Amino acid sequence: MSKTLLRSLFIPALALLLVGGGCAGVPQRVDLLYQPAAKATGGSGSIYLALAPEQGPAPTIPGQWVIGESVTKNGEKNGFIVTHISPGTMVLDAFSQELRRAGYQPLPVKELPAGVEKGLLITGSVIRLDATTSTLMAEVTSRVKVSVEPWRNGKAVSRLHFESVLTDSAASDRDRLPVDMLQKGLQTVMASAVPDVVTALEKKEGAH
C-alpha cells in the first residue's frame, strides 16, 4: 500500500476510533436552541460580534465537535457527547440574542472592523458536558467558560471572564438532560456576562 493511500485512510480510521474505541454506544448528539434569559437593558445602536481565532479544537468527527462523554456508574464508556455547532459559535449566538434583548442591533462578523464604535470579541469559549448513567438515573455536569473583550472606538476597554459549573440528575427524560444542562450553563454565564458587557460599552468617557 502506498504512503499516499495510508495517509488518506488514517483520518477516517481515527474518527472511527474516537467514536467506537472503548465505547458501547453511538455518540449522543446535543442540538441547542438557545433561549435568552439575562436581565440587561440600556444598550443602543449596532454592536459587532466576532470570534477570535483558535476557538477551541477543530471537529473531531467530520461536522461534529466532541464536547464530553457518557459513562456508567462503574466508569465504563457509553459514548461521546457531540454537537454539530462549535462551542464558539454557540457562545456567539447566545450573546447575539441576549444583546438584542438588551437594546442593541447585533452584527456578527469574521473580525471586528477597524475603529469599531461598539464591538464584542469572544476570545475564549469552552463547553463541556459529562454524563454518568445507571438503569434508573442519569447525572450530567455542564462546564461553560467564556472570555470576552468589549471594544469601543477601535480598542478593547476591558477583559472579562465568566464560568459556570452545574450538576443535575433525572430519572425521566434522561436523554434531554444534557441539552437542558447546556442551556442552563450558557444562561448562567450570560446572566453575569451581558450586564457587565453593557456596562463596559455604555460607560461614559472618564467615568470610573
Image (cartoon, rainbow, N blue to C red):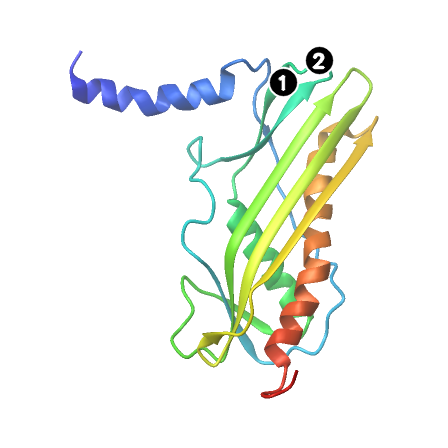
Contact between labelled residues 1 and 2, with CB atoms less than 8 Å apart: no
- Which callout, 2 or 1, points to the residue nearer the camera? 2
The amino acid pointed to by label 1 is: Asn
Locate the N terminus and report the quarter of the image it occupies: top left
* Position of residue 114 in the picture relative to residue 81 (left or right): left
Instruction: List the residue tagged with mark 2.
Output: 74
Please tell me in which quadrant of the rendered image residue 61 appears.
top left
* Position of residue 173 in the picture relative to residue 115 (left or right): right
* Position of residue 178 in the picture relative to residue 25 (left or right): right
Instruction: List the residue tagged with mark 1.
Output: 78
Q: Is residue 53 above or below residue 22?
A: below
Q: Is residue 130 above or below residue 91?
A: above
Q: Residue at x 58, y 73 (%)?
A: 105
Q: Residue at x 54, y 77 (%)?
A: 46
Q: Which residue occupies the foreground of this view, 57 or 78?
A: 57
What element does badge 2 sit on? Answer: loop
Q: Is residue 33 above or below residue 5?
A: below
Q: Residues within 10 Å of mark 1 (few under 14, many from 20)?
A: many
Residue 32, x across and y down, in percent: 63, 44
The amino acid pointed to by label 2 is: Asn
Residue 167, x across and y down, in percent: 76, 37
Please tell me in which quadrant of the rendered image residue 24 appears.
top right
